[in-house]
Image (cartoon, grey):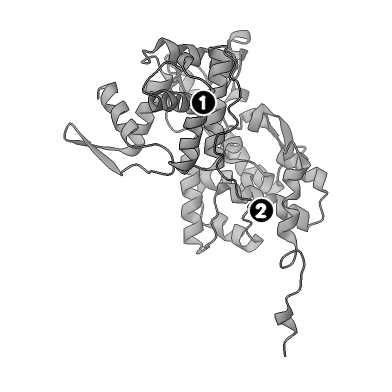
């Protein structure tokens, strides 16, 4: 499929939540799923097929700072939308008023969330400061998307047990880690073979949100299934080493250059590897990546439906339930902050509003009626 055809389709159907993709597109008499088109588009953004020298310079600036590939994809998407919004003019020709108009457009016309608008702002600021080396000036007058204050959705222990009973295999084990150790879904799928300490019952989260590292608890009940899982990882590695195309697992920063053989060592392999080898979109090397987080998210959503739970729950709800249930058992707020990896204790304190009986422990007068 021509790159321009795919790009035109994606540009026509906005990738943001406010306007969803049709389920299929008819291209050259073939039906291609939105999943395939989206990932082809991301490959074009991040692969070697990019022709724009300016976007190539953006990619170089992102990679020299060791930003994740997801950040790279998101920033490129917003920078391209910013350029297209202003009639494909070069960003160096635009000013603070143009930034304001784009951000206002997102909030007023596109009705995006505050988080989405903030992500677009970060991408634009990164482009001007680190790529163009330009002074942005004052553009604080844009309309900001409203961010409503929401309490986290929390499941009861019975509901968590019901959800876990509907899951099997790797998805069950990952869900147990999200609830039992308070992991985010990406933290769980990125765990490596060496990140488990069964003697001290702890998990090392080395690639957490914001590149922060922490140590969290490990339930004794998971030792046996994790041991079995790690044996599967060793078998995968044995098969991969027999493939001459296998370049080893992806390593962060310059570890691959400093330790050339580390990518083929057992300790660095992902604890939850993909069933197939794949090509790294940045280096074009053949590697075995971790399982796709979307498959875990879909499995958990399906389990929630099968358990007849009608709360707006997701993988992240298991993490919220971990913190809330620890509080209910009398754990210290600072301990939960460390276990959850929150930078600010105020983020952790929101769980205290969830555990109160009723609303802030207020007794309803209806209960006193005879």
Q: Is residue 322 above or below residue 143?
A: below
Label 1 residue SS: helix
Horizontally, is 331 left or right of 351 in the view? right
Q: For the point 61% across and 48% down, which residue is it? A: 176
Is residue 292 at all visible to an observer of this figure? no
The quadrant in which residue 157 appears is bottom right
Label 2 residue SS: helix
Given residues 335 and 279, the one toward you in this image is: 335
Residues at marks 2 and 1, CA–CA distance in whole angstroms? 44 Å
| Label 1 neighbour load within 10 Å: few <14, some 14-19, many 20+ | some
Query: How far from the left and from the top, in percent, is residue 292?
Result: 48, 36
Query: How far from the left and from the top, in percent, is residue 103?
Result: 50, 33
Q: For the point 61% across and 29% down, which residue is it? A: 192
Q: Quadrant of the C terminus?
A: bottom right
Given residues 128 and 340, the one toward you in this image is: 128
Q: Is residue 122 above or below residue 171?
A: above
What residue is shown with label 2? 321
Q: Quadrant of the N terminus?
A: top left
Q: Is residue 14 above or below residue 314?
A: above
Query: How far from the left and from the top, in percent, is residue 242?
Result: 45, 18
Instruction: Specify which label sits upstream in the sequence, 2 or 1.
Output: 1
Given residues 227 and 108, the one toward you in this image is: 108
Q: Is residue 124 above or below residue 135?
A: below
| Label 2 neighbour load within 10 Å: few <14, some 14-19, many 20+ | many
Which label number is shown at residue 97? 1
Horizontally, is 6 left or right of 320 in the view? left
Horizontally, is 292 left or right of 161 in the view? left
Which label number is shown at residue 131? none
The residue at the far bottom in this view is 370
């Amino acid at each position: 499929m021509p790159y321009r055809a795919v790009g035109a389709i994606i540009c026509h159907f906005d990738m943001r939540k406010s306007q969803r993709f049709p389920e299929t597109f008819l291209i050259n008499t073939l039906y291609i799923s939105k999943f395939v088109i989206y990932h082809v588009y991301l490959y074009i953004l991040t692969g070697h097929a990019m022709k724009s020298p300016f976007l190539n310079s953006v990619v170089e600036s992102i990679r020299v700072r060791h930003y994740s590939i997801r950040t790279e994809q998101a920033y490129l998407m917003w920078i391209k939308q910013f350029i297209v919004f202003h009639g494909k003019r070069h960003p160096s020709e635009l000013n603070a008023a143009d930034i304001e108009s784009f951000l206002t457009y997102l909030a007023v016309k596109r009705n995006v969330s505050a988080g989405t608008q903030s992500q677009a702002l970060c991408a634009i600021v990164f482009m001007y400061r680190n790529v163009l080396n330009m002074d942005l000036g004052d553009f604080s007058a844009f309309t900001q998307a409203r961010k409503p204050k929401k309490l986290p959705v929390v499941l009861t222990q019975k509901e968590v047990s019901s959800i876990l009973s509907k899951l099997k295999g790797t998805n069950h084990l990952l869900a147990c880690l999200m609830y039992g150790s308070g992991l985010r879904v990406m933290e769980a799928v990125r765990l490596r073979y060496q990140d488990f300490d069964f003697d001290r019952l702890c998990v090392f989260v080395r690639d957490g949100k914001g590149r922060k590292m922490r140590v969290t608890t490990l339930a004794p009940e998971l030792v046996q299934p994790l041991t079995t899982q790690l044996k599967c990882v060793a078998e995968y590695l044995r098969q991969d080493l027999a493939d001459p195309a296998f370049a080893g697992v992806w390593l962060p920063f310059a570890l691959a250059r400093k330790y050339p053989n580390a990518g083929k060592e057992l300790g660095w392999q992902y604890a939850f590897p993909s069933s197939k080898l794949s090509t790294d979109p940045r280096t074009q090397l053949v590697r075995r990546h971790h399982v796709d987080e979307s498959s875990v998210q879909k499995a958990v959503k399906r389990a929630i439906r099968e358990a007849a739970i009608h709360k707006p729950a997701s993988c992240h709800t298991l993490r919220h339930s971990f913190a809330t249930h620890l509080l209910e058992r009398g754990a210290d707020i600072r301990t939960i902050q460390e276990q959850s990896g929150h930078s600010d204790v105020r983020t952790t304190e929101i769980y205290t509003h969830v555990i109160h009986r009723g609303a802030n422990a207020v007794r309803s007068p209806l209960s006193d009626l005879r």
